[in-house]
Amino acid sequence: MMGIVQSFAQGHWVAPKGNVEPVHSALTGEVVAELGSEGLDFGAMAGHARRIGGPNLRRMTFHERAAMLKALGQAVMARKEELYALAFATGATRADNWIDIEGGAGTLFSFASKGRRELPNSQILIDGDTEILGKTGSFIGQHVYTPLQGVAVHINAFNFPVWGMLEKLAPTWLAGMPAIVKPAQQTAYVAEACVRIMLETGLLPEGAIQLVSGKAGDLLDHLTGQDVIAFTGSARTAELLQRHPVVAREAVRFTAERDSLNASILGPDAAPDSPEFELFVKEVAKEMTVKAGQKCTAIRRALVPAALIDAAQQALSARLAKTVIGDPRVEGVRMGALVGRSQLDDVREKIAELSRQAPIVFGDPEHVELVGEGLEGGAFISPILMRADDPWAADAIHEVEAFGPVSTLMPYRDLDDAVALANHGKGSLVVSAFTHDPDVARELVLGSASFHGRMAFIDRDCAGESTGHGSPLPVLTHGGPGRAGGGEELGGIRAVKHFMQRTALQGSPAMLSKVVGQQLAGAPIVEGDRHPFRLRFGELEPGYSVQTKFRKVTLEDIEHFAHFTGDTFYAHMDEEAAKASPIFGGRVAHGYLILSFAAGLFVDPAPGPVLANYGLEGLRFVKPLKPGESMKAVLTAKSKTLKTPDMGEVRWNVRVTNQDDELVATYDLLTMNAV
């Protein structure tokens, strides 16, 4: 007995003040915890997040928030065994819980890394290029992202109490927004333990997180247009939430990840003796049994060429027959239980509905052989494979999801038929294809991509490193259209922007440059007495600049560069051919010769604060430079980002112009400078 599962509200742990509800072990049916949310003031919780949590997080820069995420991930990993011990009662094996616990910590690490590498050490995120709005360039526009000044309400599903929570919290916190987390009651005791671990680090600012262990009460009544709901669960619940009058009236941002009849397609090229056939069988069986099939990304519909359906059924049945089911703490057990008896009843009900159109060809929903003691009250079920020989006449297999170890095998006539069947699920989180033919893969993308949030192509070349059909990754979007909810999570920095507002700023280049902390097009530059390469990271400010003297480029320079580098492209060496070109009109200097000469004009060679030049971005050659013409460069500090306590990245804009002040080339130069 784990005791009372508490909530965390307004900075304090709170036990329920009224009735509590029991939480039962998925393995034995015994009560393992009790929870309830009576006594919580949900309006006060939302207010606490907005008044305390939001300002505390918004005072931090993206990099400071990223460092916090990394440290929280380390804390979860340091105490992961506590979570593993609790999570066995959810019915999951250690391998299942590895996905949840260590996968959750890994998501924190991924967003921490993304935040450090891809976001500025600032509180404003610039979006896209500057737009010139006036003839002289004195009036410009710039899109930016800033954190929403509300609270993110996270409503999570039972199957991943740690990962499901952390994959929402990571981008929310990185954006600078506080959260109220409402885990599913069946596994809330695991989520509560994870929240305690993070709070005990002392790293989370006050108000950054609150936890509701029980029902959500009237929480949604207190939301505004600055708030966000991020939901994972059933389509029915999602629809109810979206229709909530306050959510509709206030235009509360709502993202949903819900029911999904994901498909996997065996390519027409994958014969029974091919690696792809074996990989397909292995993946379908794995997705049926991992987490006892309680995954939003599990394969519900397995599509195979009509001629191979008997072979696929035989191979799948043989593989499923090897699945050892029982107490996940027992060595050798590969599939545990459903989360509870009510879930078992629901899955059996859905199997009965599906089996009227797709007969069961493997497994028995009423009987299962178990390994372990005292499991009579557990929520165990056999893997169930069904077969629909006429999938277009079996509507239920494209409409009903049995959220357990259940999948339906079906034939397709040709690739067009496979595409149509995959799309007939009306939107999914993921579709996978096992093919070694790139033409097949391309046709599937063209015909089916708009119906699915992710497409995984698995073959002999990538199988060794593939994360498989059912694994959402922090750097790739997770979500899907239609039946899957129309929402989107993860995907790196894309997810962070869901918790921010994009705003179009208008004003003078000088004004907006100061606002965003970056030198924008047309903003005044400052030429000081010291060369910018003599200034340390902390001394540099955006806008500090140096303008070089002119250098004349001769034909001898061009020919020497050509022979020295081996770049004897006709535009540099053949006057007649260059004259015939509609672009050059005669011999021109190499683009990289221009870059080299530009560096020679602006580099200050003596040792100093510039530690390294480690790249350039956005290079454009705008106008050819001909022999006898002159060039100069303007080097301007554009932005800077601290990378370590000892050094930081400086982004410089370089503009190369000719003797008539016409733009020849432009690019951003990156240097690492000592603090």
Image (cartoon, rainbow, N blue to C red):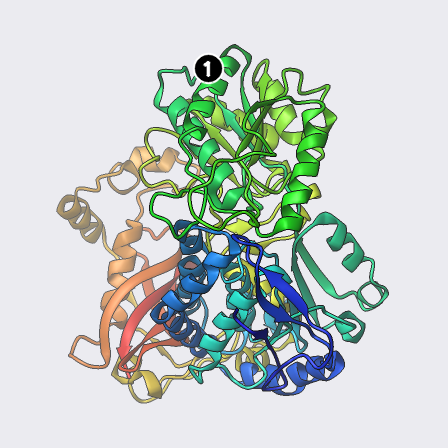
Using the image, determine if residue 137 lies above or below residue 477: below
Tell which of 634 and 305 is nearer to you. 305
Give the quarter of the image for residue 153: bottom right
- From where the camera sits, is residue 652 visible? yes
Residue beneath the point at 81% across and 69% down? 250
Q: Position of residue 287 (x, y in %)?
A: 49, 38
In the displayed structure, would residue 17 be above or below residue 217?
Answer: below
* Residue 449 against residue 204 in the figure, above or below: above
Judged from the image, the secondary structure of the residue bearing numbered disc 1 is helix
Q: Is residue 129 rendered to the left or right of residue 285?
A: right
Tell me what residue is drawn at x 53 percent, y 51 percent: 477
Looking at the picture, tell me which residue is in the foreground, 310 or 671. 310
Q: Nearer the viewer, residue 618 or 494?
A: 494
Expressed as whole percent of the image width and height from the top left, the position of residue 65 reads: 46, 76
Quarter holding residue 535: bottom left
Query: Where in the figure is residue 460, as x and y percent of width and height?
Result: 33, 28
- The residue drawn where x is 34% and y is 71% is 78
State left or right for residue 515 relative to residue 270: right
Question: Image quadrant of residue 526?
Answer: bottom left
Q: Which residue is mark 1?
A: 311
In percent of width and height, residue 482 lies at 70, 42
